[in-house]
């Protein structure tokens, strides 16, 4: 056994003899400080050098423009198709406004904005010097990319220790053909979720009620929900055990939802009925505060004949230059589109082969994401051609002939809202389509299961490029114990399954209070117990009870939350609030299929999770994200992740959109985000811990198998990697692993089927932030084992 140590024992690698060699990636320093002529100052009045050009001071506090250029590398310094690492320290002075920051980008000097930026990150208030380390790779063309720093709003800042080096900061450990198996015991493996049962309704001797007695079989769409709700209220009043609905197609145009509330030991059986909704607001069905209930045998759909949720369009023509650029969208499946006031929320590149979004090198562009916000000017040129006008540079990447899926809704209305139920079963339910999330879970929901619950278009249906216009299933808060068996989620406009509890970011506001920033959905109430974490997610060992909540700005999510107990000292930028009333844990996903969707397959922001015998296919932005994070403008989600088992699944052609973290595309991502999502800032505290990826098959990965960051005790073992298809942009890291900010990571006994498309399989590790890494027994074979 070879044992190698770096950095006084902080980086330890165990390797089986002859299995792998350690290759340090050589680096050539191109820029060292600001005085070698490779840095151009764009605003000399705002920049002052000192300490022999080692340090610069920036002052745009008196500048009137919103954006001010500060510096740029000289054009031609950065070579095409080359990897670079940038390092520096920065400080932003006290008194800086919240919306002021340093904006760092790697941008084409002459092709912007038509050529996308390949790297961008923002640096916000930091009273003490803070280290920055960023990597990026320039594309093969154009050859004019530069690294630039701008300021947004006025600020005073300092930057020192600036350097740009060519090459990688990683060590590389290749898989080899003759690698012997790693035979040391794999101890401390996670066990995943415990098996549990969801209780079904008990026979309470209650009556079985026919909904037809309340007029459901003879009412029109404008009062069907009212009739069914009357039947439900009667069931609650009588303590009925079952409500039947005669099989049929029921159209629903009421905005009020179908409500199942406060029921106990109750079953709703729709006997294969289909609900077809056409609404303007609100969700379609509520199941709340029920105990031991079952809902079975029904289908959800939308009235596509009157109001399509999405359409396949082709760029009939494009005029992207001039002061008023436009694209003409041809609705290829319609001679005359049925809704003249159609909304274009999002356009996503469409793959006619898979009949879904997700194309290598494709394009996704949001327009009227929220209704009546940023609404573009449009006009009909013919019954099926819509002209959409954009801002200068906004439409440059749209080319005539390209296919897109036009999404006409996003977070507008939702299907089934489940809130604070206990022992709930959803069985044999199909959501064919929905304007919004398909299923939303919130509150103190605990012990529930989906059995053969599918989000998929009806068989043989035409003109159905989308199912849900947001997540298929969105878990905002819960108390856990959820199982999902033999379900298929496809063709949605966002994540298939998003599991998390909401958090909030706050700063100390006196001895016993904090002030939140963007806490719009943390679901806190007086009496709740709140755990405070430091800004890097490390524990403060503080658990306090809320005594008062004062709202300063509800729209911005700014509240003053007071506690009984005195607060600890604040480190970093502030605190992250974990409401321990919630705990999305003990989750089992078995025999399910996730794919052909925009965004990810599963987001796991919880603990005690088992995912086994599932299929992930053509998930546009990757298969699985294990993460947690907070932002100052969007969302703050997750208490971390712990005890997760991902076993005996198949991953095929996931992340065709090449979504990257740390400039590498990946099938599975583990990491955090801080202040913005995504962000490259990570934590050395292992907020994501005890994760096992074992016995899976990965076919035709687009980038890394997994990017592993902010983790502790991750084991990747006995997986098989098959890559028999080429890709448009061949990454040299295809089917590899990348590890940073981790401790006790083991990547062992994995098998690569030899492929010309994977020239260098292996593991990249950042020796500056990785502690105790085991890489052994990873081998290359000629045939699939």
Image (cartoon, rainbow, N blue to C red):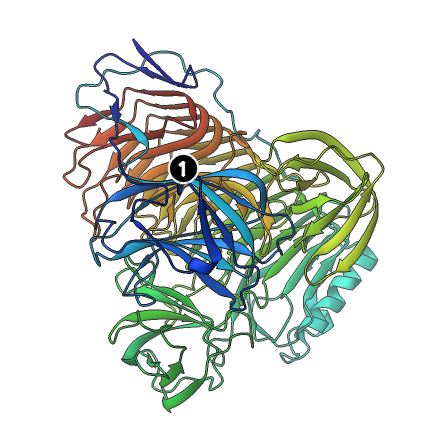
Judge whether 499 appears above or below 634 on screen: above
Relative to 705, 418 lies left or right? right
Q: In which quarter of the image is the C terminus?
A: top left
| Image point (39%, 81%), residue name | 388
Badge 1: residue crowd in 10 Å (few <14, some 14–19, many ≥20): some
Instruction: Give coordinates of residue 23: x percent, y percent.
Output: 24, 25
Q: Which residue is drawn at 52% across and 71% down?
A: 302
Where residue 287 sits in the image (x, y, percent)? 68, 56
Q: In this view, does 537 lie above or below 484?
A: above
Q: In which quarter of the image is the N terminus?
A: top left
Quarter location, residue 582: top right
In the foreground, 583 or 37? 37
| Extreme-bottom residue of the structure | 382
Q: Nearer the viewer, residue 314 or 167?
A: 167
Q: Which residue is found at the position 27% from the left and 42% from the top?
A: 83
Dot 1: element: loop
Q: Position of residue 761 (x, y in %)?
A: 23, 32
Extreme residue in the top direction: 1
Horizontal arrangement in the rendering, residue 286 relative to residue 8 (left or right): right
Q: Give the left or right position of residue 241, taking residue 64 as reference.
A: right
Measured as percent of width and height from the top left, residue 721 is found at 26, 35
Residue 629 appearing in the image: yes
Q: Mark 1 points at which residue?
A: 613
* Residue 74 image-quadrant placement: bottom left
């Amino acid at each position: 056994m070879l044992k190698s140590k770096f950095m006084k024992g902080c980086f330890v690698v165990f390797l089986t003899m002859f299995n792998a060699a350690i290759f340090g990636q050589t680096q050539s320093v191109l820029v060292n400080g600001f005085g070698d002529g490779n840095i151009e100052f764009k605003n000399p009045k705002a920049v002052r050098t000192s300490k022999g050009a080692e340090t610069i001071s920036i002052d745009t506090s008196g500048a009137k423009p919103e954006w001010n250029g500060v510096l740029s590398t000289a054009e031609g310094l950065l070579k095409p198709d080359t990897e670079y690492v940038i390092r520096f320290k920065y400080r932003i002075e006290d008194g800086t406004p919240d919306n002021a920051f340093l904006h760092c980008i790697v941008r084409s000097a002459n092709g912007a904005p038509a050529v996308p930026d390949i790297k961008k990150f923002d640096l916000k208030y930091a009273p003490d010097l803070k280290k920055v380390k960023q990597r990026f790779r320039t594309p093969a063309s154009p050859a004019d990319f530069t690294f630039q720093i701008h300021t947004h709003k006025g600020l005073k800042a300092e930057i020192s220790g600036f350097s740009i080096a060519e090459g990688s900061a990683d060590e590389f450990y290749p898989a080899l053909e003759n690698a012997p198996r790693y035979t040391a015991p794999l101890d401390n493996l996670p066990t995943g979720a415990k098996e549990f049962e969801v209780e079904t309704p008990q026979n309470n001797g209650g009556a079985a009620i026919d909904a037809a007695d309340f007029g459901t079989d003879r009412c029109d769409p404008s009062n069907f929900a009212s009739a069914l709700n009357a039947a439900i209220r009667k069931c609650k009043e009588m303590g009925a055990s079952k409500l039947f609905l005669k099989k049929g197609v029921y159209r629903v145009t009421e905005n009020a939802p179908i409500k199942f509330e406060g029921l106990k030991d109750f079953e709703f059986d729709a006997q294969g009925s289909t609900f077809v909704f056409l609404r303007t607001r609100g969700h379609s069905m509520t199941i709340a505060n029920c105990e031991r209930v079952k809902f079975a045998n029904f289908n959800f759909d939308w009235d596509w004949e009157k109001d399509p949720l999405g359409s396949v369009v082709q760029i009939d023509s494009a005029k992207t230059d001039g002061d008023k650029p436009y694209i003409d969208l041809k609705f290829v499946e319609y001679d005359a589109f049925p809704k003249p006031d159609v909304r274009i929320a999002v356009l996503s590149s469409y793959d006619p082969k898979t009949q879904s979004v997700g194309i290598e090198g494709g394009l996704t562009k949001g327009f009227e994401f929220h209704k009546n916000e940023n609404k573009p000017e449009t006009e009909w040129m013919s019954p099926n051609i819509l002209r959409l006008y954009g801002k200068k540079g906004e439409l440059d990447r749209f080319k005539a002939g390209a296919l897109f899926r036009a999404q006409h809704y996003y977070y507008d209305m939702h299907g089934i809202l489940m809130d604070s139920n206990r022992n709930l079963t959803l069985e044999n339910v199909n959501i064919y389509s929905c304007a919004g999330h398909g299923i939303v879970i919130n509150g103190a929901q605990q012990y529930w299961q989906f059995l053969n619950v599918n989000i998929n278009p009806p068989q043989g249906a035409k003109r159905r490029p989308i199912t849900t216009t947001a997540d298929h299933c969105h878990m905002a808060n819960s108390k856990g114990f959820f199982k999902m068996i033999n379900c298929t989620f496809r063709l949605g406009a966002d994540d298939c399954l998003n599991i998390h509890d909401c958090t909030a970011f706050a700063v100390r506001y006196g001895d016993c209070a904090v002030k939140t920033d963007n806490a719009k959905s943390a679901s806190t109430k007086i009496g709740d117990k709140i755990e405070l974490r430091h800004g890097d997610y490390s524990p403060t060992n503080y658990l306090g009870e809320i005594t008062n909540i004062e709202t300063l700005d509800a729209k911005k999510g700014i509240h003053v939350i007071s506690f009984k107990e005195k607060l600890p000292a604040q480190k970093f930028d502030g605190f992250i609030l974990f409401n321990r009333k919630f705990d999305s844990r003990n989750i089992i996903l078995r025999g399910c299929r996730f794919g052909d969707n925009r965004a990810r397959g599963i987001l796991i922001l919880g603990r005690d999770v088992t995912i086994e015998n599932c299929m992930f296919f053509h998930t546009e932005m990757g298969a699985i994200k294990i993460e947690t994070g907070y932002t100052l403008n969007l969302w703050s989600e997750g208490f971390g992740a712990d005890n997760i088992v991902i076993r005996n699944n198949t991953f095929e052609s996931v992340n065709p959109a090449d979504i990257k973290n740390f400039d590498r595309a990946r099938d599975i991502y583990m990491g955090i985000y801080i202040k913005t999502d995504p962000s490259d800032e990570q934590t050395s505290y292992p907020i994501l811990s005890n994760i096992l990826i074992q016995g899976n098959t990965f076919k035709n990965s687009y980038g890394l198998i997994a990017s592993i960051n902010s983790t502790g005790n991750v084991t990747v073992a006995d997986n098989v990697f098959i890559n028999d298809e080429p890709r448009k942009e061949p990454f040299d890291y295809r089917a590899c692993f990348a590890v940073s900010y981790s401790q006790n990571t083991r990547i062992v006994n994995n098998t690569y089927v030899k492929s010309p498309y994977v020239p260098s399989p292996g593991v990249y590790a950042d020796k500056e932030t990785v502690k105790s890494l085991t890489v052994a027994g990873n081998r290359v074979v000629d045939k699939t084992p």
